[in-house]
């Protein structure tokens, strides 16, 4: 009887965009098994670049290399945390697909060798990673009774950049306050019907600030939705009006 096999996908991960570093100076090699969910690939990249503070992130399944970063904004297939997404936002968009990274596997994406996909971490500092699928191969399964999947960083070339360097927007207190108000404004919009937990706001780095300013009430559990105070709604309305005035004057 032949020995069971495991199919592995080998990705070369490098940085592009404003935080570009030449791949020959900085890259990571990551192996993930076909049955691994994209969440496992996210965790491997997070570990590979020595990050310590989580942020919102997503995968963009372009399957081909993009020439311009702007092309990623028009990606029609993404993989992300569905727990943070209102499905109704996409019901009428037949050209857009969002997969749940907790259940959508590497095999599900039907990637081919040399395909490129992208991973966008932190929607403020915008760490954009290029993942090239270098090889699909099989190894013997020495533990056929095992449960789970494989996701391993097998090579690290170059020192990981600091997560919060001098150019990080999170080092700018005024920018962080504005981000908190923008999120608050979105939560107050009845048309969007957005509910966020304390944990969600912590991911964005604004939970403590909004609470200390009296704009939200802190729930008993981090996984419970926060309650917006009257002061918070007034602040969101004032910020929305300020944005409208700015746009009337020609933008920022």
Image: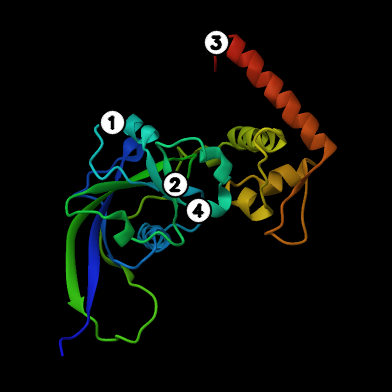
* Residue to which mark 4 is pinned: 81
Q: Secondary structure at mark 2?
A: strand
Q: Quadrant of the N terminus?
A: bottom left
> On the rendered structure, is 240 left or right of 17?
right
Q: CA distance from mark 4 to mark 1?
A: 25 Å
- Between the C-alphas of marks 3 and 4, the distance is 35 Å
Mark 2 or mark 4, which is nearer to you? Answer: 2
Identify the element where label 1 is drawn. loop
Residue at the top extreme, as displayed: 249
Q: Earlier in the sequence, mark 3 or mark 4?
A: 4
Q: Nearer the viewer, mark 2 or mark 3?
A: 2
First reached walking from the N terminus: tag 2 or tag 4: 4
Give the image location of residue 49, x and y in percent. Answer: 37, 57
Mark 2 and mark 4: span between their CA atoms?
9 Å
Residue designated by label 2: 98
Mark 1–mark 2 distance (CA, rounded to whole Å): 22 Å
Which numbered disc covers residue 94? none
For disc 1, the neighbor class at 10 Å (few under 14, some 14 to 19, many from 20) is: few
User: In which quadrant is the C terminus drawn?
Assistant: top right
- Rounded to the nearest angstrom, the CA distance separating label 3 from label 1 is 26 Å
Mark 1 or 2, nearer chain start: 1
Number of numbered labels in the structure image: 4
Position of 166 relative to 103 (above/below) = above
Label 2 neighbour load within 10 Å: few <14, some 14-19, many 20+: many
Reading the chain from its start, which is encountered first: label 4 or label 1? Answer: 1
For this rendering, which residue is in front, 17 or 117? 117
- Residue 50: horizontal and vertical position, in percent? 40, 59
Q: From the viewer's perspective, tell me whether residue 219 is left or right of residue 9.
A: right
Left or right: residue 85 versus residue 183 is: left
Q: Is tag 3's residue or tag 1's residue first in the polypeptide sequence?
A: 1
- Residue 200 in the image, given as x and y percentages of width and height: 62, 51
Task: Look at mark 3 in the image and give the residue it sits on.
Answer: 250
């Amino acid at each position: 009887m032949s020995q069971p096999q495991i199919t592995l996908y080998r990705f070369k991960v490098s940085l592009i965009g404003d935080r570009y570093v030449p791949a020959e100076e900085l890259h990571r090699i990551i192996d993930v098994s076909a049955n691994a969910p994209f969440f496992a690939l996210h965790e491997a990249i997070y570990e590979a670049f020595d990050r310590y503070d989580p942020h919102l992130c997503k995968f963009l399944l372009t399957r081909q290399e993009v020439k311009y970063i702007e092309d990623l904004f028009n990606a029609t297939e993404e993989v992300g945390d569905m727990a943070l997404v209102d499905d109704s936002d996409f019901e009428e968009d037949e050209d857009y697909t969002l997969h749940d990274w907790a259940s959508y596997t590497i095999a599900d994406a039907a990637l081919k060798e040399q395909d490129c996909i992208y991973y966008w971490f932190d929607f403020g500092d915008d760490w954009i990673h290029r993942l090239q699928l270098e090889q699909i191969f099989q190894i013997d399964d020495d533990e056929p009774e095992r449960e789970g999947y494989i996701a391993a960083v097998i090579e690290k070339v170059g020192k990981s950049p600091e997560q919060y360097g001098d150019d990080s927007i999170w080092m700018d207190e005024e920018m962080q306050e504005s981000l908190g108000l923008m999120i608050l404004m979105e939560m107050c919009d009845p048309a969007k019907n957005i509910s966020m937990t304390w944990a969600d706001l912590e991911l964005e780095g604004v939970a403590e600030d909004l609470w200390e300013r009296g704009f939200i009430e802190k729930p008993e559990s981090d996984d419970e939705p926060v309650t917006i105070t009257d002061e918070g709604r007034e602040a969101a309305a004032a910020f929305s009006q300020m944005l409208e005035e700015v746009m009337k004057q020609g933008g920022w």
